[in-house]
């Protein structure tokens, strides 16, 4: 029997990408809403409660509205907004987070897909906190560079119009240091405070890398960057979608430069450690439309419906 799936917010970037993942699959039946009824509360209620899985690809307020429409106890909601990412009643949709996380997602009826920047930051920071190398009071400093597709339809249109020279250069934003991913960046790493975090949009469609800075004096105990790389490798040894690169290997760079787009089209996260015994950085790379959004949502759905976790996803 096929799984009935509804996408509430089917015209957004994340919703369209979810359709792209689902369309070739024979184990799902996609429930579609008529364009004229996309804002019809009654029709949305009907389709949500007719589904086995509903993806919410909506702004926060609309996601909360849709979540309140559910009266079918069997319907699984997988939300791509920021509305529920720190809620105790919703499973955080990052199976690689901790040993028990995969089973929590597998049995959850409410799942909050992580933000793209947050996924990268959390996967690089959580093992360090768990191992006691970083104390919870650690003041993290990070930046992210990302493709413009993460900004949604208007930003995509602005970049692809190619009539504004200002868009040719990288553009830092959220300089008030209140980015919407900050709460989950603290909540799911074990840090007591979110990082000082500055994202940057580049003139490329997709791809993302988050870099976090460390010095030996900040660590709770003496540690080399080689040991951090080994910790990552052990922590994620059994994770199909996480690849830990060798420390400082020449193959990690292209003539000294880092390729932010190398994971595009996959659901993979690559983790790197660069530096020396005095200071080092961690870099987490992913596709902001894949593991950073729609791919993560599909991975969570696969767990919930008993499919192979990587079905329809590329490593």
Image: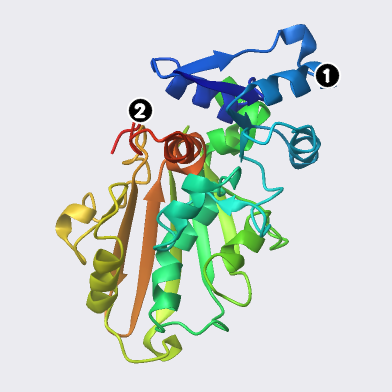
Q: Residue at x 32, y 58 (%)?
A: 271
Q: Secondary structure at mark 1?
A: helix
Position in image of residue 221 (x %, y %): 36, 92
Name the residue tied to disc 1. 42
| Residue 224 shows in the view | yes
State whether residue 16 is above or below residue 124.
above
Q: Earlier in the sequence, mark 2 or mark 1?
A: 1
Identify the residue at image location x=28%, y=39%.
Answer: 315
Quarter of the figure with residue 47: top right
Q: Where, quadrant-wise, is the N terminus in this rendering?
A: top left
Residue 147, percent across and down?
A: 49, 39
Q: Secondary structure at mark 2?
A: loop
Q: Is residue 9 above or below residue 178?
A: above
Asked whether 160 or 222 is in front, the reply is 222
In this rendered view, identify the residue nearer to me: 307 or 215: 307
> What residue is disc 2 on?
312
Q: Is residue 179 above or below residue 277?
A: above
What separation in Å lies between label 2 and label 1 (alpha carbons)? 32 Å
């Amino acid at each position: 029997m096929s799984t009935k799936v509804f996408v509430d917010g089917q015209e957004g970037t994340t919703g369209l990408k979810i359709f792209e993942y689902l369309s070739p699959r024979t184990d799902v039946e996609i429930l579609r809403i008529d364009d004229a009824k996309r804002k019809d509360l009654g029709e949305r209620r009907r389709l949500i409660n007719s589904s086995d899985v509903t993806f919410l690809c909506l702004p926060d307020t609309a996601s909360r509205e849709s979540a309140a429409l559910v009266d079918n106890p069997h319907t699984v909601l997988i939300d791509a907004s920021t509305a529920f990412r720190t809620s105790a009643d919703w499973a955080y949709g990052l199976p690689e987070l901790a040993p028990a996380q995969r089973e929590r997602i597998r049995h959850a009826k409410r799942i909050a897909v992580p933000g793209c920047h947050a996924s990268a930051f959390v996967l690089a920071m959580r093992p360090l906190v768990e191992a006691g190398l970083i104390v919870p009071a650690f003041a993290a400093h990070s930046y992210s560079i990302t493709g413009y597709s993460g900004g949604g339809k208007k930003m995509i249109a602005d970049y692809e119009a190619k009539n504004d020279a200002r868009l040719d250069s990288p553009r830092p934003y959220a300089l008030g240091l209140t980015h919407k991913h900050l709460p989950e960046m603290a909540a799911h790493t074990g840090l007591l405070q979110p990082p000082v975090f500055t994202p940057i949009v580049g003139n490329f469609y997709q791809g993302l890398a988050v870099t976090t800075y460390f010095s030996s004096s900040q660590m709770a105990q003496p540690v080399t960057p080689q040991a951090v790389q080994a910790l990552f490798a052990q922590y994620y040894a059994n994770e199909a979608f996480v690849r830990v690169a060798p420390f400082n290997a020449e193959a990690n760079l292209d003539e000294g430069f880092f390729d932010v787009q190398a994971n595009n089209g996959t659901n993979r996260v690559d983790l790197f450690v660069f530096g020396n015994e005095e200071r080092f950085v961690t870099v987490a790379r992913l596709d902001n439309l894949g593991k950073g959004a729609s791919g993560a949502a599909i991975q969570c759905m696969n767990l919930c419906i008993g499919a192979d976790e990587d079905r329809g996803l590329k490593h």
